[in-house]
Amino acid sequence: MTQPEKGSLESFGYKQELKRTLTLKDLVIYGLIFMVPIAPFGIYGEVVTASKGMIVLTYMIGMVAMLFTALSYGSMSRAFPIAGSVYAYAQRGINKTVGFLAGWMILLDYVFVPALLYVVSANSLKAIVPDVPVWIWLVVFILVNSWINIRGIAFTARANIIFLVGELIVLAIFIAVGVVAISNGAGDGVTMKPIYNAADFNLPFVMTAVSVAVLSFLGFDGISTLAEETKGGNKTVGKAILWALMLVGFLFIIQTYIAALIHPDYLNFDNIDTAFYQIAGEAGGPFLKNVTIIATILSWGFANALAAQAAISRILFGMARDQNLPKFLAKVHPRFQTPYLSTLMVGFVSLVVGLVFVNDIGILSSIVNCGALTAFLVIHVSVVYHYIIKMKSKNYLLHLVVPVIGFLIILYVMINLDNLAKIIGISWLAVGVVYYTILRLTKKKTTIDMD
């Protein structure tokens, strides 16, 4: 009997069910969409206030901080090119129990992310079209995104390109109009204050900036969920994660620098939640203001949510395939070769959660942050355990120094999360421990058990 090639999907006990169509470019685009190149549009006021006006420095710090986590994802994706992200990496890199709990915690992030995005977008639309109930917008977002995702990952990739081009066009317009406004006297002229202001700079500020900025980059890890639909070998995912992170960081830096120069008084906004739109209006009038608002709604409600739904459906697929979740979630569409029942399940959960938390965006954000950061901690531990302890790797820089630094950065951010996020995270973990204990006592052995 022919032995499967080392590093192939078959060598891990699985068969190829999902369609391999994605290239490095597709993955980078997917990552950009997930992180939203124009994300500062919606959160500018909060970040610029927390950073004491040094918003560009904040995003620089955030990008460098997240590079350590991105490198750890790259290391694990090369070792285990399997759908499931941190679930698969911890499961194979450490053991099946840690893998399950890591997957359980990332569910806290990914299952609630689409709902958060839908709620934010639906509430924004309510401000523009007040006569349409919020729940109708929720249904529209969910139906459209579910249909696109079920049609196939290649179809999703094409939709991602359309959304990304639209976002970049809006961003280019803002930058061009902003540069003209600055040259015509807007703000205080070109200055280094958005990057460094000695009067307000100190170490506590730097760490506060890290806490804010790291959360702005959540989403690049979603690229790893598409490992079984990627062409080009097991290094493609790691490369895509790094490229997406650096590109989106560059875009964050450019747009926030322009915005900070146009409106240097970071404590003076009509409304902190709509600070960027106010700046766009100051630079380009009502037209640019409305364009940036609409672009934010579409990028969060369709583009970002589309990517998030695709990511979580693959994690559900991977966990169900190993019999750690109900088996029907591993069902693949016979024509489109996508995990369509997992996709529909995510859509249903998003609708229920969206309706429950439609007026509690803060709680949803706390849930998402806690799940993602816990998964990041596990990724760093997985790298050290798999490469240094099990494989006796001598690459101490990539397999020891990088994950240890990354772990400490994420741990600091987690310690400084609000208490509600910590309570929700611990409660969710406790439920997972109980569920997994029952699962292990009642189910038969799986492929993973026999490794």
Image (cartoon, rainbow, N blue to C red):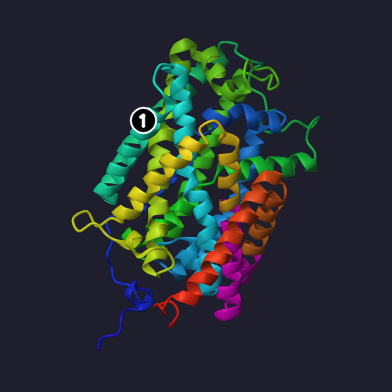
- State the residue position of label 1: 166
Residue 322: where, in percent of width, then height? 40, 70
From the viewer's perspective, is 210 left or right of 399?
right
Residue displayed at 65% across by 59% down: 407
Q: Residues within 10 Å of mark 1 (few under 14, many from 20)?
A: some
Residue displayed at 41% across by 58% down: 316
Stretch of the chain drawn in magenta: 372-401
The secondary structure making up most of the magenta span is helix
Residue 121: where, in percent of width, then height? 45, 30
From the viewer's perspective, is 432 left or right of 4?
right
Above or below: residue 259 compared with residue 252: above
From the viewer's perspective, is 306 left or right of 87?
left
Location of residue 147 (image quadrant): top left
The residue closer to the viewer here, 343 or 159, is 343
Looking at the rendered structure, the secondary structure element under dot 1 is helix
Residue 427: where, in percent of width, then height? 62, 55
Residue 342: where, in percent of width, then height? 35, 54
